[in-house]
Image (tube, coloured by chain):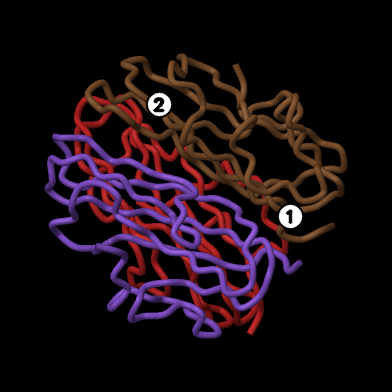
Chain colours: A red, B brown, C purple
Amino acid sequence: SNWDPSQSVLVNIGNHFDLKTSVFQAPRRGIYSFSFHVVKVYNRQTIQVNLMQNDYPVISAFAGDQDVTREAASNGVLLMVEREDRVYLKLERGTLMGGWKYSTFSGFLVFPL
Amino acid sequence: SNWDPSQSVLVNIGNHFDLKTSVFQAPRRGIYSFSFHVVKVYNRQTIQVNLMQNDYPVISAFAGDQDVTREAASNGVLLMVEREDRVYLKLERGTLMGGWKYSTFSGFLVFPL
Amino acid sequence: SNWDPSQSVLVNIGNHFDLKTSVFQAPRRGIYSFSFHVVKVYNRQTIQVNLMQNDYPVISAFAGDQDVTREAASNGVLLMVEREDRVYLKLERGTLMGGWKYSTFSGFLVFPL
């Protein structure tokens, strides 16, 4: 299951983030900053979250604590993105029983190329 | 108790971050990036930190591990901010016995609107 | 041991990040955003990671959980940087038995001064 932004998109300038597919599609070539914090709620499984660029994992984050009610798998990166590249989050391992509540996913253009 | 920046403000261009009230007040309308890492030190309580915009919570972060000497509640977000909006951190739950040492709170204008 | 970017540098516009010394050297004066997520793998030691500016620690992050296979020490900050300042990560305490795999270190110019 991928990122569900249905009730959580705070900013979507230019509408490059598709609310149905949960995929960001780059409007132009450049360096983008992406970061995410995915919160695991009451769940003893380890989760692994991948930041995907065109179906390839770029970076990963993990949350595997067993005694914590809420724990975040967080990471962030600068990426060289081509026009129309797709960037999105993928839950590679584990499940999010409580859904994507409290989770965030942000990206913006640092500078165009 | 809110964020205490007294000894920890590293950058404050334009003086839009009020060191007395610990509140960032936006100089102009635009998209801002905010992120924070609030560190809990030797404390078995769960903490919840809210990023507030004009008295409304926008995102939350949690730290609740019982066996760790230092643990961070982290999150970040892009926000659409109106001129003179106030943005600040609020400790919604728990206490920070060691104060805000090691904690960071950063924001900058991504682009104006 | 400092950050080893040998297989992990995703973006290095301008070649201001030296792949041999693992040090970012600022091409010009300005406000930069830096963030890092250093992942501890199968390691019961507490680690402390410092973000260094010209041999001085600016911010720290910790990971000290004993029962977790992967845990990140994360933080981020805006820094006022002079031309030719050096910024890098330093493992102040503990060891990274699994190396810097999954770890990220990102920086970019927010605005010049």
Name the residue: 50% across, 59% down. C53
Q: Is B37 left, or right, of B32 in this rendering? A: left
The chain containing the residue under callout 2 comes to B
Q: Is C111 left, or right, of C67 in this rendering? A: right
Q: Is A35 left, or right, of A28 in this rendering? A: left
Circle 2: element type: strand
Instruction: Tell me which corner region of the image, top left, top right, bottom left or bottom right, holds residue C19.
Output: bottom left
Q: Image quadrant for the N terminus of chain B?
A: top right
Residue A82 in the image: above or below residue B37:
below
Circle 1: element type: strand
**Residue C92: % across, % down:** 30, 50
Instruction: Tell me which corner region of the image, top left, top right, bottom left or bottom right, holds residue A46.
Output: top left
**Residue B72: % across, % down:** 40, 35
Name the residue: 60% across, 23% down. B90
Tag nearer the camera, 2 or 1: 2
Name the residue: 64% across, 67% down. C82
The chain containing the residue under callout 1 comes to B
Q: Which residue is mark 2?
A: B40
Q: Which residue is mark 1?
A: B109
Residue type of the residue flagged with mark 2 = Lys
Q: Nearer the viewer, residue C15 or A30?
A: C15
